Amino acid sequence: MTLQRSSGVLLHPTSLPGPYGIGELGASARHFVDWLAQAGQRSWQVMPLGPTGYGDSPYQAFSAFAGNPYLIDLTTLREEGLLHDADFEAMPAFNPRRVDFGTQFVWRNQMLDRAYAHFIYGEHAELTAAFEAFKQEEADWLGDYALFMALKTAHGGLPWNAWEAALRDREPGALASARERLAGAIDRVQFVQFLFFRQWTALREYARERGVQIIGDIPIFVAMDSSDAWANRDQFYFDDQGQPTVVAGVPPDYFSETGQLWGNPLYNWPRMKEDGFAWWIKRFQGSLKLYDIIRVDHFRGFAGYWEIPYPAETAMNGRWVPALGHEMFEAVRAALGSLPIIAEDLGVITPDVEKLRDDFGFPGMAVLQFAFGGGDFAVNDFLPGNIKENRVVYTGTHDNDTTRGWWVNADESERHNFRVYTSSDPGEDTFAWQLTELAFSTRAVLAVVPLQDLLNLGSEDRMNLPGTTGDHNWTWRLDPAALLPSLAAQLRELTERTGRSA
């Protein structure tokens, strides 16, 4: 993949402002695209768009292919006659600055139930034809996902490996009976996915027309409780009861002294090789329907992954196991051509990870918040002057503190190293913009800055604290008054000055 020197902004759609408690794919999303274009930005980076479950993390979705129903724009549904004014009468009071996922789970699902009822009992010939076409086009994953979600609801939310054995093990007779018994619920799930993809496709086209490309994000692993694991059990390490024998995580690192126990099922790479990595080909094919560029989270897991015996209380007692990433990417390239991938190559990076990244020409990542630690920081690969051209540079990511928060809480040694490197002594109010200027000034082909850093927000507005399930994770929302034309002009000037404009 060949990127042009450019820049962009990281903001998950759930963080957009709007009247219904969470960001949506309607007017506020289009306004943000307009602001990006005004600011001279050519990329909007988002996190995974899948349907979230317990913990509300976009990196733990019920499907690697489906979209998040919470993002469906209700105003658009009202304009299309799928919702009526009366449907909004019992709307709860929402916090404009934080997402309450519990409220969304109840109220928004009720609204989508009403939208489906209005569709079924109304006259929507054009929409019906489009829905039928969507079901045919996405049948490869949509049928399993819709059945999975209908069964999950019927089982009171229990994970698939807690269902009765016949459904857990996907016995054909049990599946056929479930499809007949739950036909209405299955069709409702499919219709909601139709609404999501219809709106996302329209938003992506709106962005493309304004010169803004979408950088998406796919987690390397799928969630334990997902349609992917249930419908493709042979692709993972499960026992006869549907319990994982080993799970994913990372060893102790910058974020956690005991590592991170993610709990995702691990891929059975030899089995995947036997069928030509068909599942991965389908997954990347699905991602290309959503994104212009794909950021692959935890890229190092394609070279070797941290295998933790199940069950475990922490990630400390794991081991590194080689993966078949090189053969997989060869198969995907043969099927789909050269892929527009950014490799999230952070963490414990070894020569085999670098070789895998470089053999396929994938740009790696550099995070400036990691640049100034250690004694001999001058050799740090993330130091602005050391960053190579085929990299995507960030001030911080969704897992980092905001840059203002990082500076306030940084070790004095890191603050000292920054002062020495830049011959400056920034204050709390100026540091985030100074680090943004450094990012844009590097040789990295693409510079991406979280919107919180452009707004100079503190730690209370960080997106996620890894290794925790705190109430604030993933809940931050943008103040609609914050996207000022003056900030767009300031960002455009920096973009042009550093040679990143179109």
Image (cartoon, helix red, strand yellow):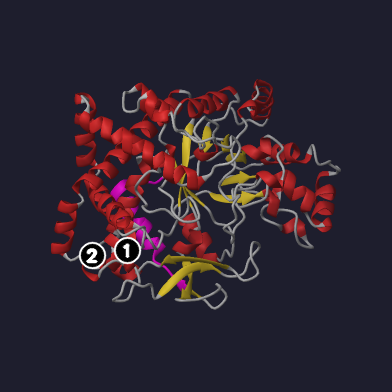
The answer to whether residue 10 is left or right of residue 204 is right
Residue contact at pointers 2 and 1, CB within 8 angstroms:
yes
Which residue is located at x 70 percent, y 47 percent? 459
- Whether the magenta-drawn stretch holds residue 184 is answered as no
Q: Nearer the viewer, residue 4 or 283?
A: 283
Q: How far from the left and from the top, in percent, is residue 145?
A: 29, 51
What's under tag 2, amino acid-wise? Leu
Which residue is located at x 69 percent, y 25 percent? 490
Disc number placed over residue 160 in the picture, else none: 1
Residue receiving disc 2: 167
Q: How far from the left and from the top, in percent, is residue 15?
A: 55, 38
The answer to whether residue 106 is left or right of residue 184 is right
Q: Nearer the viewer, residue 48 or 8?
A: 48
Q: Nearer the viewer, residue 10 or 27?
A: 27
Give above or below for 249 relative to 217: below
Classify mark 1: helix, strand or loop: helix
Q: CA distance from mark 2 to mark 1?
A: 8 Å
Classify mark 2: helix, strand or loop: helix
Dominant secondary structure (helix, strand or loop) of the stretch shown in magenta: helix
What's under tag 1, amino acid-wise? Trp
The magenta stretch spans which residues? 321-339
Of marks 2 and 1, which one's residue comes earlier in the chain?
A: 1
- Whether the magenta-drawn stretch holds residue 332 is answered as yes
- Crowdedness of circle 2 by 10 Å Cα count: few (<14), some, many (20+)? many
The answer to whether residue 238 is left or right of residue 443 is left
